[in-house]
Amino acid sequence: MKNVHLLIVDMQNDFCETQAKGAQLSVAGANGDAERLAKFIGKNTKKISDIHATLDSHNTIHVAHPIFWINSKGDHPGIFSLISADDVKNGVWMTTNPAWRQRGIDYVTTLARNGRYPLCIWPPHCLIGRWGHSLFPCVGEALTKWENDNFGIVDFCVKGSNFFTENYSVVKADVPDPSDPSTMLNTELIKVLQDADDILVSGEALSHCVRNTVVDIADNFGEENIKKLVLLKDTSSSVGGFEKLGDDFVRDMVKRGMRISSTTDYFA
């Protein structure tokens, strides 16, 4: 039997398509993505060898939430504001806790140097223990069915609880903290995935957490293993306004060997 792993990235309530129930960071298309994924898992439960599900997990106080930063007028930055290294060095934005000033400067300076993303201020989302942190209900139900049908255990991978760094990728934080192993390279997950024949990738959002997770896996996988990665294109969408990031990611990874499929085609 083919050893097929399913990697589900941050399929959580706060990324729901609608804010009607309180979703904090809506991704257009996410509800449909989740429904198609749940149906796929239910239909193919015996064909999926292992499931890894990442959970974006934040505190209210976080470097990418408005409350972390303040200006000279006492205002916090607006949602989707970008904060540069110069902004912090020049005092345009300061850490709300003055004791964290140098750490804030070091963080945005390192972000600029590593070329991943500028610091973007997001709505407080996926707060630990709150509704937004939980899986989409249909996906949670599908995972429970898979566990029961296979007497298996879903590998839940928590990321983002260190409030001094973003953690788009489950493989490592944007700026790893040597004092916090959870932010460092996740060699255990990489090793497990290397044993798979295929790794089906799904989740939210294509432009950010899916993108960074897949790129980090590929960069630490060995080029010959990248062909194991298969993006289920009908189960992942980009954050509105960031669609180009998602499109560029798919194009670049296909050039490196990643394959594209869908929930209706993969096991057909």
Image: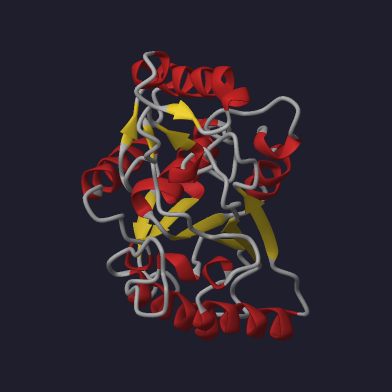
Against 20, residue 82 (above or below) is above
Residue at x 29%, y 69% (from the top left corner) = 29
Residue 112 visible from this viewpoint: yes
Q: Residue 254: percent from the left, percent from the top?
A: 33, 43
Residue 65 visible from this viewpoint: no
Q: How many marks?
A: 0
**Residue nearest the observer in this picture, 118 or 211:** 118
Quarter assignment of residue 91 = top left
For the N terminus, the image quarter is bottom right
Q: Residue 120: percent from the left, percent from the top?
A: 37, 39
Residue at x 59%, y 46% (from the top left corner) = 160
**Residue nearest the observer in this picture, 172 or 43:** 172
Left of 52 or right of it: where is 215? left
Name the colouring of the figure: secondary structure
**Residue nearest the observer in this picture, 80 or 211:** 80
Q: Residue 114: percent from the left, percent from the top?
A: 45, 20
Residue at x 38%, y 51% (from the top left corner) = 259
For the C terminus, the image quarter is bottom left
Quarter assignment of residue 93 = top left
Q: Residue 263: percent from the left, percent from the top?
A: 39, 73
